[in-house]
Image (tube, helix red, strand yellow):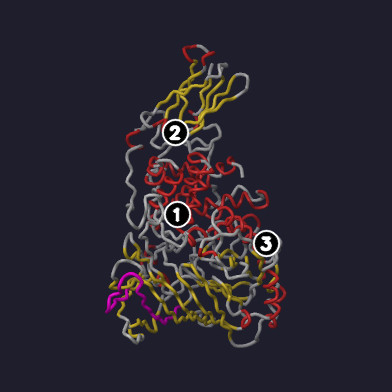
Amino acid sequence: MSRLSLITLFATTAVAFCQTQSTYDPRVTFAPLALPEPVNAYRSSNGAPGPSYWQNEADYEMHASIDTTAKALTNDETITYTNNSPDTLTSLWIHLEQNIYRNDSRGHNLGTPIGGDQRRKAGTPAGAAPARPERGITNGIEFDSVEIENGTPAPRFIKADYLVSDTRMQVKLATPMKPHGTKLRIRIKYHYTIPGFWGGRTSWGTAEHGDIYDIAQWYPRICVYDDLRGWDTLPYIGAEFYLEYGHFDYYVNVPWNFLVAGSGELVNAAEVLTKTEIARLEEARHSDKTVYIRKPEETTDPTSRPKQSGTLTWHFRMDHTRDVVFSASPTFVWDAARINLPKDDHPANALPAGKIPLAMSVYPLESVGDNTWTRSTEYVKDTVENMSKRWFPYPYPAAVSVAGFSTGMEYPGVVFDGIHDKDDFLFWVTAHEIGHDWFPMIVGSNERRNAFMDEGFNTFIDIFESEDYAHGKYAPKRDSEYSAGGEPQDTILKVLDNPQAPVILTPADAFPGQLGHPVQYFKGAYGNVLLREQILGPERFDWAFRKYIRDWAYKHPSPSDFFRAMQSEGGEDLSYFWRGWYENNWTLDLAVKDVKYVDGDQAKGVVVTVANLRQLVLPATLEVTYKDGTKDRIRLPAEAWLQKGVGNFTFKTGKPVASATIDPDHFLPDDDRSNNTFTTP
């Protein structure tokens, strides 16, 4: 992959506006930087988990059922919670995210649908203008019972003392939960009405030949209790999630003619699939080409199911995950192919002996086509294999892409995309959503607080997948779904120039309107591009970034952990960059002010005067073009501006000079390119 193609995704040649008066103050840019989260026994100075790092665990057993007449889900859920912290817990906090659909919820009364206006309406062809999602109202989660183990020598479930507050529930403990490994079980029976399409995250809708149920945020989920804030109980008002890791064992009961695609591994294939389908799954485990498990013509054939009446219960398991979701429909075509992974010794990456992970897709009949969902599994497979080689091996037994009504949304091992997605857009959206398995499913950052560690990092690794697939067939990557027709390189300078633009470290729900996406996704990704291509270089960056991923796999890093990890392992003091790019929205404007021969003698070389006019500092390339057409380049380090805003840089070739240019390749977000070149008389 060329460094040029990576940079040009974000850089722009446009001139934003022309300013010549310097506002640069090195005392501000290079002042000592105190990162938000301190170094201690839990989080080390090198950005890795500390020697006393701890993390609580949440295991789930669930028995769910879909009532396709009432459009309702019922569930019998048991949570086994382990308190590994050094603290005694007097209560437990649990997310109830279906409560956002209540008409008295905080999210409802903000007036902004989940996902915001930029989410495309399912069924809308890719590339069409975004539609504002229809608002849905339900009663949220309705409890049948909430019980907690009493903790006596003969444990039994008793009625819990609990309080519901918007999208959270507090369970008060009669006996406090002791630290260092104490376990407690909670049993919750409940039901809720499945909302129709709105907001793009969980829904049911009718395809041409049947309903599709995309079921997410469907069960009460333990909030994270961590060393940074204790219980992290931010309400669900639109931004995504922060969850504990654990083991999931879940059952889904649906009508006999439904297929279910779920996170993890299908445990009871013999009960819910035909012998033909089981044989095809085994064929797919040994095939690099896509194999139909249920063919398009079989979706209307009752014999494609093992029984022709009643219901079937699908059983899935998943380890080292923070969440599970599923999609169910009678109209699904299903295909699959094997995923080839590099060997890795990380303890969470050991699949059972002989188990080969599968790339899979399920989609309705209208999604079938040579340039549509028939290619989906190929894209899933390629994305997982390439990202596994570059960054960290995929740890789960399957990666599934679903065509339904909850478009452009990601969960561990399963992504939801649009029925009519096709061509290059289907590739891009598949790569982006599958890429989320690395950020934040494997590296479990707090999406509700730090969106750049989720969307920004994932947009960054998407760039490589677009370059890798079919020798760059779909490169460079574009995010037209989210930018409403605009391109990332058209947005970066606009964001930096906009005095209303929030900084990257703004909490995810606090990003206003149209500014959220370019800051979280594009500026977040561009930060990594600049680190890799301009500051550290690919070799140092890749080494440090891979170590960061391995150190924090299935754990909860903060922004400070990332900053320290890249700085320590990358071998640079990057305080100036963290302050300028992440803590502030500073701009860069480099200008070539003068070109003069040394002592007026061409033979002694030429001195080029460059000024840094704005508060942001970045390393840069300075190029001199001689009158014979040849060129020379030198690199100006960030430290060139450590003491002052103007520097003189010497080229000793001794030839007549035609011009000098700073950032000749347009790799940097330079705010005013009209002053980047000085031409000699």
Is the C-beta separation of discs 1 and 2 under 8 Å? no
User: Considering only order in the chain, which callout, 2 or 1, is on the residue closer to the N terminus?
Assistant: 1
**Residue 355 in the image, given as x and y percentages of width and height:** 61, 70
Alpha-carbon neighbours of circle 3 within 10 Å: few (<14), some, or many (≥20)?
some
Type of amino acid at the residue the image marks with label 2: Asp
* Residue pictured at 68% horizontal, 74% vertical: 294
Asked which secondary structure carries label 1, the reply is helix
Question: Which quadrant of the structure image shows residue 481?
Answer: bottom right
Distance from label 1 to label 2 (Cα)? Answer: 27 Å
Q: Which residue is mark 2?
A: 589
Question: Which quadrant of the structure image shows residue 212?
Answer: bottom right
User: Considering only order in the chain, which callout, 1 or 3, is on the residue closer to the N terminus?
Assistant: 3
Of tags 3 and 1, the one toward the viewer is 1
Q: Magenta segment, which residues?
A: 170-192
Q: Nearer the viewer, residue 44 or 35?
A: 44
399 is higher (above) or lower (below) than 71: above
Q: Which residue is mark 3?
A: 375
Q: Is residue 395 left or right of residue 580?
A: right
Q: Is residue 473 left or right of residue 516?
A: right
* Residue pictured at 38% horizontal, 51% vertical: 560
Q: Nearer the viewer, residue 226 or 456?
A: 226
Q: Nearer the viewer, residue 318 or 293?
A: 318
Type of amino acid at the residue the image marks with label 3: Arg
Type of amino acid at the residue the image marks with label 1: Met
591 is higher (above) or lower (below) than 337: above
Question: Which quadrant of the structure image shows residue 394?
Answer: bottom right
Pick the quarter of the image with the C terminus: top right
**Residue 523 in the image, given as x and y percentages of width and height:** 47, 47
Pick the quarter of the image with the N terminus: top right
Q: Which residue is mark 1?
A: 453
Distance from label 3 to label 1 (Cα)? Answer: 29 Å
Q: Is residue 445 magenta?
A: no
